[in-house]
Image (tube, rainbow, N blue to C red):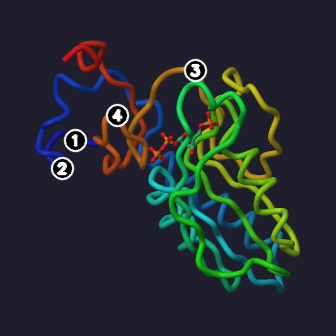
């Protein structure tokens, strides 16, 4: 990705590109194909977790060739002290019933696994016909709670990454690739 497209503003900020836009698009296409095969003859309901998952969900949904609809949830941990309990606060819930539907939770990244394991158990209580999880990025080294991942884009090392939906202080979500930031960025 040349500096021209992003106006060069990442010069001096970007450290290393971990996943190029092309690599991400190829993998997202493969995930969409796998989902389309697995759900042949059925209809899927994608649940995206804001804010990080919006870019991934937008691209993934357009690679799915079975009937699909989607909604978003917004969650937030209660804070450092209670985060280890795995309880997250639902800021915005999905607006439709998922009872009897084939649901796929779509996440940008799984780290400790606390957010996803909470969401999986919470959504299971709503009696979906099936419930699966699709994540773009998996950081297995960071896992605190085991969580079953049905579709994974990439397993990545334990580095702080941004781009393609992931942010630092609200920034870089719109960048079409995944990269690390230079250390100076965190001390500004
Ligand atoms: C990220 C990500 C997951 C969660 C994963 O969200 O989108 O929801 O963290 O972490 P965990 O596995 O340790 O629970 P974040 O809190 O950064 O919010 P955002 O998506 O709005 O950026």
Pinpoint residue 68: horizontal percent, then vertical percent. 65, 81
Question: In the picture provided, is 122 more to the left or to the right than 171?
Answer: right
What x and y, as percent, mark residue 169?
Answer: 31, 35
**Judging from the image, what secondary structure is the residue with disc 2 in?**
loop
Q: CA distance from mark 2 to mark 1?
A: 6 Å
x 83%, y 73%: residue: 128
Q: Is residue 158 above or below residue 76?
A: above
Reading the image, the residue beneath label 4 is 168
Q: Which mark is residue 2?
A: 1
Q: CA distance from mark 4 to mark 1?
A: 21 Å
Foreground tag (4 vs 3): 4
Who comes first in sequence, dot 2 or dot 3? 2
Q: Secondary structure at mark 1?
A: loop
For the residues labelled 2 and 4, the Cα–Cα distance comes to 20 Å
- 171 left or right of 60? left
Q: Is mark 3 within 8 Å of ligand 1?
A: no
Assess mark 4: CB under 8 A from ligand 1? Answer: no
Q: Is residue 173 left or right of residue 115?
A: left
Q: Is residue 71 above or below residue 124?
A: below
| Secondary structure found at label 4 | loop
Q: Is residue 8 above or below residue 135?
A: above
Q: Nearer the viewer, mark 2 or mark 3?
A: 3
């Amino acid at each position: 990705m040349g500096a021209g497209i992003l106006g060069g503003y990442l010069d001096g900020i970007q450290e290393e590109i971990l996943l190029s836009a092309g690599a991400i698009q190829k993998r997202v296409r493969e995930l969409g194909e796998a989902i389309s095969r697995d759900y042949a003859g059925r209809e899927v309901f994608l649940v995206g977790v804001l804010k990080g998952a919006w870019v991934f969900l937008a691209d993934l949904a357009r690679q799915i060739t079975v009937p699909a609809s989607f909604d978003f949830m917004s969650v937030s941990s209660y804070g450092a002290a209670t985060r280890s309990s795995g309880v997250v606060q639902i800021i915005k819930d999905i607006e439709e019933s998922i009872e009897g539907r084939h649901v796929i939770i779509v996440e940008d990244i799984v780290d400790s696994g606390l957010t996803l394991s909470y969401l999986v158990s919470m959504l299971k209580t709503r009696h979906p016909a099936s419930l699966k999880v699709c994540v773009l990025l998996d950081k297995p080294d960071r896992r605190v709670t085991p969580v079953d991942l049905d579709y994974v884009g990439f397993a990545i090392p334990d580095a702080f990454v941004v781009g393609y939906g992931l942010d630092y202080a609200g920034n870089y979500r719109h960048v079409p690739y995944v990269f690390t930031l230079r250390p100076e960025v965190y001390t500004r």
